[in-house]
Image (cartoon, grey):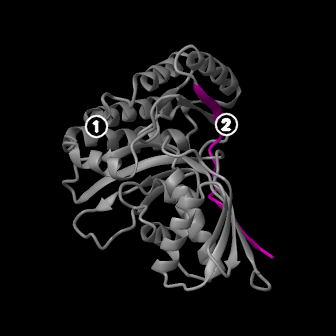
């Protein structure tokens, strides 16, 4: 039997494309930093309500139960919840599945028990602030986001500050491809890979910062897709070369690298890899998206196979509704 008069909380999150890290040197006292966008699908969709026992139905019940227990313990809540997970973002492919599920679970329970915590505080309590704050920022606001990385001089600052958020042009689309190859690094393997990387040379950090501030972000503001794509591709190349020791090359696999090059040769203004991959993407104008999608599907079908879809940037964050 469920508690009488039970409220339900519905959460639908965006996915995210990670467009690059900013500083893998850290000599200014901050490390990582990143930029990315919210995309309108795939999504985490779940519904939560109070319950006499902790109960999870739907997709990925084991992980969802762990996340719910973590939140209840962190905020010393003795009551329980029932969560129905209706849709999930594919895991470990570079679309931000872990952060979006953790935030969907924690936000839904926070609403049920009137916990006054921001999404950034929830992300910290759920262990989602080790390397990137992009996922949290797109959960809150959508659009194009830039976050300022970890404060290495003061570990008490667990949140990763949002330093810029811009609405993304409605006229642009991302063609997103997930080649049928091994999944990207996650959890302990990701942490270990970051620790093994040599510091990025300061001059390379400077290239990324200049491209970001003086080309990519102004291009978004002026809806200049050609300049945006050029800056994006150059940032991806610098970041990818810095990760070569951990992932075996500029990008995570030969199929991913070949797919990026194929997109660039077939109409994409810029292209790159999201996080550790295998997801790659190309940016185009909306009328050009279907053509590039079809060509990319053909390219993958002739090699490793995979999934290709067109995504629009979502210029608002997650949908959260409370109802009876």
286 on left or right of 130: right
The magenta stretch spans residue 162: no
**Towards the viewer: 293 or 187:** 187
**Residue ID at (53%, 51%):** 97
Closer to the eye: label 1 or 2: 1
Residue 5, numbered circle:
none
**Residue ID at (81%, 76%):** 324
Looking at the image, residue 152 lies above or below residue 32: below
The answer, for residue 11, to whether it is visible in the render is no
Looking at the image, residue 60 lies above or below residue 236: below
Residue occupied by mark 2: 171
- As measured in the structure, the alpha-carbon distance from the residue carrying label 1 to the one carrying label 2 is 36 Å
The answer, for residue 250, to whether it is visible in the render is yes
| Quadrant in which the N terminus appears | bottom right
**Towards the viewer: 161 or 311:** 311
Q: Residues within 10 Å of mark 1 (few under 14, many from 20)?
A: many
**Towards the viewer: 111 or 6:** 6
Q: Which badge, 1 or 2, comes first in the chain's sequence?
A: 2
Residues under numbered marks 1 and 2 in contact, where contact means CB atoms less than 8 Å apart: no
The magenta stretch spans residue 309: yes
Residue occupied by mark 1: 246
Q: Residues within 10 Å of mark 2 (few under 14, many from 20)?
A: few
Question: For the residue labelled by badge 2, is the local secondary structure a helix, a strand or a loop?
Answer: loop
x, y percent for residue 238: 32, 33
Question: For the residue labelled by badge 1, is the local secondary structure a helix, a strand or a loop?
Answer: helix
x, y percent for residue 37: 54, 47
x, y percent for residue 53: 64, 78
**Residue ID at (33%, 44%):** 209
Residue range highlighted in magenta: 306-324
Mark count: 2
């Amino acid at each position: 039997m469920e508690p009488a008069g039970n409220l339900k909380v519905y959460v639908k999150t965006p996915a995210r494309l990670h467009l690059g890290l900013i500083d893998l040197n850290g000599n200014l006292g901050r490390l990582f930093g990143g930029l990315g966008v919210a995309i309108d699908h795939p999504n985490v969709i779940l519904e939560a309500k109070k319950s006499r026992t902790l109960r999870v139905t739907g997709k990925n019940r084991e992980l969802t139960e762990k996340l719910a227990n973590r939140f209840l313990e962190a905020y010393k809540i003795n009551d329980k919840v029932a969560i129905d997970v209706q849709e999930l973002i594919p895991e470990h492919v570079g679309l931000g599945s872990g952060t979006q599920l953790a935030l969907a679970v924690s936000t839904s329970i926070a609403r049920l028990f009137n916990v006054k915590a921001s999404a950034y505080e929830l992300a910290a309590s759920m262990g989602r602030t080790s390397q990137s704050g992009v996922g949290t920022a797109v959960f809150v606001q959508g659009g194009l986001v830039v976050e300022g990385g970890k404060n290495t001089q003061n570990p008490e600052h667990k949140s990763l500050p949002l330093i810029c958020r811009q609405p993304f042009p409605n006229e642009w689309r991302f063609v997103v491809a997930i080649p049928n190859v091994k999944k990207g690094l996650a959890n302990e393997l990701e942490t270990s890979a970051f620790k093994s990387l040599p510091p990025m040379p300061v001059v390379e950090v400077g290239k990324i910062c200049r491209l970001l501030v003086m080309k990519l972000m102004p291009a978004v503001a002026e809806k200049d897709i050609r300049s945006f794509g050029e800056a994006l591709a150059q940032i991806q190349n610098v970041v990818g070369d810095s990760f070569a020791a951990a992932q075996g090359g500029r990008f995570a696999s030969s199929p991913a690298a070949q797919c990026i090059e194929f997109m660039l040769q077939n109409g994409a203004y810029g292209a790159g890899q999201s996080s550790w991959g295998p997801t790659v993407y190309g940016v185009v104008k909306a009328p050009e998206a279907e053509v590039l999608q079809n060509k990319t599907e053909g390219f993958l079908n002739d090699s490793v196979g995979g999934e290709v879809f067109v995504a629009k940037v979502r210029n608002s964050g997650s949908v959260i509704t409370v109802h009876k």
